[in-house]
Image (spheres, rainbow, N blue to C red):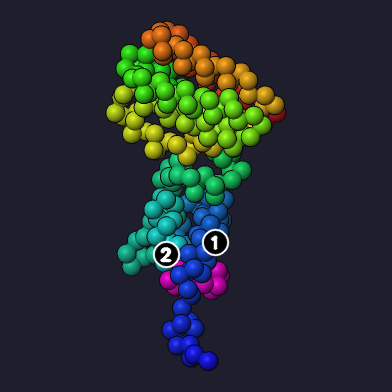
Amino acid sequence: MTEISEQQQTTPSRAQRPRVQKNVTAMMATEILNGRYAQGTMLPRENDLCEEYEVSRTVIRETIKTLESKGLVRGKPRIGTMVCDQDDWNLLDQQVLDWLGPRIVDLDLLLCVLEARRAIEPVAAELATQRASAMDIAALEIAWNRMNEAGGDIEAFTQGDVDFHIALLRASHNQVFRQLCGIIEAALRYTLYTSNDAVPSREEAISEHLELIEAIRLRDKERARKSSHKMLDLAARDLGMINQ
């Protein structure tokens, strides 16, 4: 039998290490977001974290790096690792959204995303009536077709819905709005899925999305703005059902 070196015996394989770290990162992140590690306080020492989570220093260090990249913690030289204030958390990050779980409702994050959309999307719709190319309109149509053909598949419907709103921002040809696509996509996906899942039928949404495409195709600025506002009103109504 081939002998296994001491290093091979004590070092996790590449297949094992990311999985272990991912689990520990999710646990620590959840405990930070749920307040077990309070904002503005220091995390336990590295050795104590190793003992608590039963992992190596390498796993803890990589976990801290990940949490720091999400704005949850900040390392202080010769002092330790401090839990950041909520304002520093990257709440638009997909992993942070997953870690938050039900706390998303407590933080009013769904409402905050909707308010941001109200400030941006009607303006993007107006700009699209002036600037959208044939390819931009085609992208909106493709996304709408995905929504229309999704049937009862909420995952497929939401993917089409996300694609539609990203295509709308791009059709505005506003460079800031285009940059926002990558920043808000995860939060947009979460809120759209939540509102889509809250209603028994999505026919109104399908109809209003088609109305917006027609307004952009006809270069009707006022019609596009009204359609966008109505679409957001439907989202607000559907999100309101969550707490009923």
From which residue to which does the magenta span run? 47-59
Q: Give the Cα separation between the discs numbered 2 and 1.
A: 12 Å
Q: Which residue is mark 2?
A: 62
Examine the image and state in which quarter residue 242 appears.
Answer: top right
* Rendered location of residue 190, percent (x, y): 54, 37
Seen from this angle, which residue lies furthest left?
175
Front-most of 96 and 186? 186
Quick check: is 188 in the magenta stretch?
Answer: no
Examine the image and state in which quarter residue 236 appears.
Answer: top right
Secondary structure under the numbered disc 1 in the rendered image: helix
- Image height of 69 relative to 57, above or below: above
User: What amino acid is found at the position of numbered circle 1 in the picture?
Assistant: Asn
Q: Which residue is mark 1?
A: 23
* Rendered location of residue 196, percent (x, y): 61, 30
In the image, 136: left or right of 160?
A: left
Mark number displayed over residue 81: none
- Residue located 45% across and 36% down the image: 185
- Image height of 241 relative to 51, above or below: above
Quick check: is 48 in the magenta stretch?
Answer: yes
User: What amino acid is found at the position of numbered circle 2 in the picture?
Assistant: Glu
- Residue located 33% across and 67% down the image: 78
